[in-house]
Image (tube, rainbow, N blue to C red):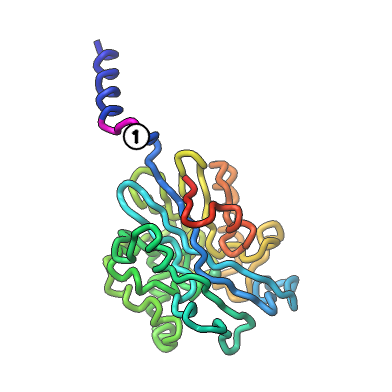
C-alpha cells in the first residue's frame, strides 16, 4: 500500500515545482556568483612566505567577492576592497605597503546587475577580517553577520579601533544581528548542508573557508587567504604576518583533507587563474 502513496506524494511535489525547475529536495538550487572586487598589484610578495622564497617577486592578485544565492536567502562571502577606490582615477597606493589597488567596478553596481541592493542580502560572512575582505563590510550592516567568536573579538579590540583606515570599513557590524561560531565547529548556514563555513585558523585567529555544494557543478571550496599565490598551496608557504604558524599548517591539512573527502573544486581566492576559471559575472556557477 505504501508504494502508490509515495508515488502520489512525489507527483504532487513535482506538480508544485512546475515544469521548469530541476531542483530536488536533496539538492537545493544554490548558485555561486564570482564578482571582481579589486586587483592588487604587488611590487614585492615576500610577505606571503616566511621562508623568503617569494622575496622581491612582483605579482598581480585578484580580490573577489562571492554571492551565494540559496532558496532561503543570499549570502555575501567576502566584500573585497572598499568600493570608494573605484572613484580614485589612479587607484590607491597605501603608504608602507608594497601594492597598488584598483577597483574596476563597484560591488553595489555588480549587485544591481542582479537587481539586488546590499539591504536585500540576508547574510554576510568574511573569510577573515583583513581589509581586502571586509572593505565593504558596512554596506551589509543590515544583514545577519556570521562570524567566528575569536575573529570578532580581534576586529573590535583596542588596536583595531585605534586605526580607523580599515576599522571604519566594517565598524557598523558591531551592532548587526550576529550569529557567532564557537570553538572548532563548522557552521551550516542554511541548515541543509549546502553552504558550510569551515574553521581554518592561523592566518587570523578565526580565519574560515566556505564549502558550497552546487546542484550541478558539485562541491566548491572558497579558501580565503589559506593560499595567496599560485605556488602557495603546493609549497605550503606560511605568510610572515599570519597569527599562528602551526595553526596555519594544521588548517592547510584540514582543508586538503576536506577537498579529498568531498572531491571539491578548490578556489584559491586571490589567484587570478582560479577566478578566471569561474563563470564571468553575472553568469553563476550552479
Ligand atoms: Zn586577502
Mark 1 lies on residue: 25
Furthest toward the top, the residue is 1
Where is residue 117 shown, x and y percent of the image?
Answer: 33, 64
Depth check: give the residue in front, 200 or 133.
Answer: 133
Where is residue 74 shown, x and y percent of the image?
Answer: 35, 55
Query: Is 193 drawn above or below residue 19 in the view shown?
Result: below
Q: Residue at x 49, y 48 (%)?
A: 285
**Residue 227 placement: quadrant:** bottom right
- Left of 54 or right of it: where is 212? left
Query: Is 69 drawn above or below residue 144 in the view shown?
Result: above
Where is residue 8 shown, x and y percent of the image?
Answer: 25, 19
**Residue 212, visible in the rendered structure:** yes
**Residue 67 placement: quadrant:** bottom left
Query: Dot 1: what SS?
Result: loop
The residue segment tinted magenta is 16-20
* Image quadrant containing the N terminus: top left
Q: Residue at x 57, y 47 (%)?
A: 265
Where is residue 15 shown, x and y percent of the image?
Answer: 27, 27
- Left of 44 or right of it: where is 103? left
The image quadrant where one finds ligand 1 is: bottom right
Query: Is 2 drawn above or below residue 71 in the view shown?
Result: above
Question: Which secondary structure type mostly characterizes the magenta part of the structure?
Answer: loop
Amino acid at each position: 500500500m505504501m508504494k502508490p502513496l509515495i508515488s502520489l506524494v512525489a507527483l504532487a511535489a513535482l506538480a508544485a515545482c512546475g515544469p521548469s525547475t530541476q531542483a530536488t529536495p536533496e539538492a537545493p538550487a544554490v548558485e555561486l556568483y564570482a564578482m571582481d572586487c579589486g586587483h592588487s598589484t604587488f611590487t614585492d610578495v615576500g610577505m606571503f612566505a616566511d621562508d623568503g622564497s617569494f622575496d622581491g617577486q612582483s605579482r598581480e592578485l585578484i580580490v573577489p567577492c562571492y554571492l551565494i544565492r540559496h532558496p532561503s536567502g543570499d549570502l555575501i562571502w567576502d566584500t573585497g576592497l572598499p568600493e570608494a577606490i573605484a572613484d580614485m582615477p589612479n587607484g590607491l597606493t597605501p603608504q608602507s605597503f608594497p601594492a597598488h589597488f584598483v577597483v574596476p567596478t563597484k560591488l553595489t553596481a555588480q549587485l544591481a546587475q542582479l537587481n539586488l541592493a546590499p539591504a536585500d542580502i540576508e547574510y554576510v560572512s568574511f573569510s577573515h577580517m583583513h581589509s581586502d575582505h571586509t572593505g565593504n563590510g558596512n554596506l551589509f550592516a543590515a544583514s545577519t553577520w556570521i562570524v567566528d567568536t575569536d575573529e570578532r573579538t580581534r576586529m573590535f579590540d583596542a588596536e583595531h579601533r585605534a586605526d580607523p583606515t580599515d576599522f571604519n570599513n566594517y565598524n557598523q557590524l558591531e551592532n548587526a544581528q550576529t550569529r557567532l561560531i564557537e570553538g572548532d565547529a563548522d557552521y551550516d548556514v542554511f541548515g541543509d548542508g549546502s553552504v558550510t563555513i569551515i574553521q581554518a585558523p592561523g592566518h587570523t585567529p578565526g580565519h574560515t573557508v566556505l564549502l558550497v555544494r552546487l546542484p550541478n557543478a558539485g562541491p566548491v571550496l572558497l579558501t580565503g587567504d589559506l593560499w595567496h599565490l599560485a605556488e602557495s598551496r603546493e609549497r605550503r608557504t606560511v605568510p610572515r604576518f599570519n597569527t599562528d604558524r602551526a595553526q596555519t599548517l594544521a588548517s592547510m591539512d584540514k582543508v586538503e583533507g576536506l577537498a579529498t573527502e568531498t572531491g571539491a573544486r578548490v578556489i584559491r581566492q586571490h589567484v587570478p587563474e582560479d577566478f578566471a576559471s569561474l563563470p564571468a559575472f553575472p553568469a553563476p556557477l550552479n
